[in-house]
Amino acid sequence: MAAAMEIGGIALRNPTGRAGRTFLGTGRRWRSARKDVVGTRLAVRALMAAEKRDGRTVEVGTSNRPVNSDKLNVLHGIQSSVPIVEEAKMVTDFQRKTKIVCTIGPSTNTREMIWKLAEAGMNVARLNMSHGDHESHQKIINLVKEYNAQSKDNIIAIMLDTKGPEVRSGDLLRPVLLKEGQAFNFTINIGVNSEDTVSVNYDDFVNDVEVGDVILVDGGMMSLAVKAKTHDMVKCKVIDGGELKSRRHLNVRGKSATLPSITEKDWEDIKFGVDNQVDFFAVSFVKDARVIHELNDYLRSRNADIHIIPKIESADSIPNLQAIISASDGAMVARGDLGAELPIEDVPSLQEEIIKTCRSMQKPVIVATNMLESMINHPTPTRAEVSDISIAVQEGADAIMLSGETAHGKYPLKAVKVMHNVASKTESIMSNDTLHTPATAVQYVGCGDFSQGHMSAMFALHATTMANALGTPIIVFTQTGSMPILLSHYRPSSTIFAFTNEERVGQRLTLYQGVLPLYLQFSDDAEETFSRAIKHLMNGGYLRKGDYVTRVKSGIRSIWRDDSTHHIEVCNIQD
């Protein structure tokens, strides 16, 4: 397909062998470079542009010097200032990188709607275990798996979202209209449903609240101040009124209920998810890392390869944020209950903090709740909702989520299309900026400990920098998902085509920003597998003849490469 030449651990392909556009370079192999950095603080090696023109040669390769920001800026400006690959046809079709999670419910639980959601842009199907039963959720799981079997290039992952320890009001014979200033009571006695008193489903509710607390109904749609309490009743005064219906969600401002994060119902739902090999568990009301460790122990006992996404939505979770995310496989910013238990004005900064924490740990983060709430009943969103989506994308969220919009809304497909269009537009602007912004540096203190993980992290940064400079997508082959995840962390401006022969790995990679997982059987011949991958991308319309791609051969587990060698190859696509 193309001739390649080795340049110190980085290989660039010269597609034609013609003079005048030859990539050259110097530099030691990564193995020998190790002795130059042990015991010193490492900064990412500077990548430098290269071109041989009129007998003058400029190096391309790696340097053991710390990053020079001016040189990195030169590299990022290659595409516009130095036409190294002037014959190349760059990929022009923009692929959305931020993923979309859709909650499946009565509006979308048919075969036709699952297919339409997938084609409109859904990447993850969410099962909300607060509603429905195992029979109805089994139907959805079967439909998603049927879709995946027929559409290998558009993998849809399945996320099971536990109900968690929700505190809810009891059943009412008819809705009760609460008026500002009136007295209203909550009791732990079962079955009470009068005009001024309703039962709650939580026996310790009286012990958890104190006089002066504010009780929020449905995340703040109504609010009541606690004025007094007895052994079985909490006596309140309505602050903000409204129509109280049956089984409404209750929060106490600034407090979390002393219920376990995983209830008996949740364990039954988790067992159901394990039996059906879902891809993610979204765990509600996680307060600390202990519940994550407990669930991980259970999954190991069942030999279940399912990733855990804690929902950050309780007051207790914020002081334990680092430990929770460190123990988990990502996080969800569940802004509804988060804004009920904590001051609502804190939610934007908490969202940014959670995203940054996940990004620093190379773990995916989902921003959820009220993103297009108005589209439950209206065909167009508010302008504030559009800005909300754009801000989440700019802050670096891997995924954004639709809840009632797709579960029971009137316009589920329009909601997905709006989210897709807003995210794509925001990313296209950010992508242009990326070409002129150095990728985030990776710094480690050597001290004699230079692990394979450190090597892979630096290599992912090099690959991202090169792909951004040349304007190419990235092709990577993986059996564990480690290298695509690292590449996603550095947010290359083009798509990461992650080929894997492990279906579970492909489904998990669906959640990561910028990664398009594709299933492909690997052969013992690396070049033959690469040729089939290129053909696959060309047949799918992702690449055209003459396009350039950046091919990465690295990662914690070797597939074809020598264990001590890492490669980046820039290839020109030919027939």
Image: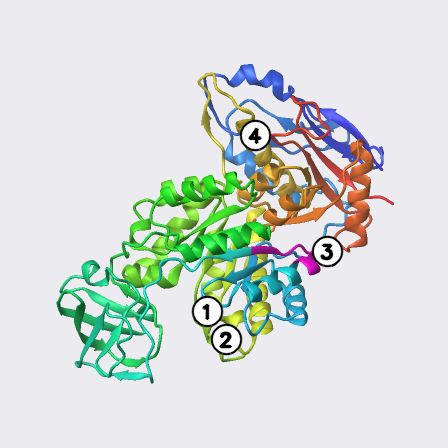
Q: Is residue 296 left or right of residue 494?
A: left
Residue type at mark 3 is: Ala
Closer to the camera: disc 2 or disc 3? Answer: 3
Return the residue at label 4: 46
Residue type at mark 4 is: Ala
Q: Residues under labels 4 and 2: Cα distance? A: 48 Å
Residue type at mark 1 is: Glu
Q: Is residue 457 left or right of residue 557?
A: left
Q: Residues under labels 3 and 1: Cα distance? A: 34 Å
Could you say which is closer to the camera, residue 475 or residue 544? 475
- Crowd band around label 2 with a 10 angstrom C-alpha radius: few (<14), some (14–19), many (20+): many
- Crowd band around label 1 with a 10 angstrom C-alpha radius: few (<14), some (14–19), many (20+): some
Q: Residues under labels 4 and 1: Cα distance? A: 41 Å
Task: Kindly indicate whether the residue at mark 1 contacts the one at mark 2 (C-beta within 8 angstroms).
Answer: yes
Identify the mark nearer the N-term, 2 or 3. Answer: 3
Identify the mark nearer the N-term, 2 or 1. Answer: 2
Q: Secondary structure at mark 1?
A: helix
On the image, the x and y values in percent for residue 504 come to 63, 45
Magenta part of the protein: which range? 145-158
On the image, the x and y values in percent for residue 544 come to 80, 51
Return the residue at label 2: 375
On the image, the x and y values in percent for residue 219 come to 33, 68
Within the magenta stretch, is there residue 319? Answer: no
Identify the mark nearer the N-term, 4 or 1. Answer: 4
Name the quadrant of the N terminus: top right
Q: Residues under labels 3 and 4: Cα distance? A: 44 Å
Q: Secondary structure at mark 3?
A: helix
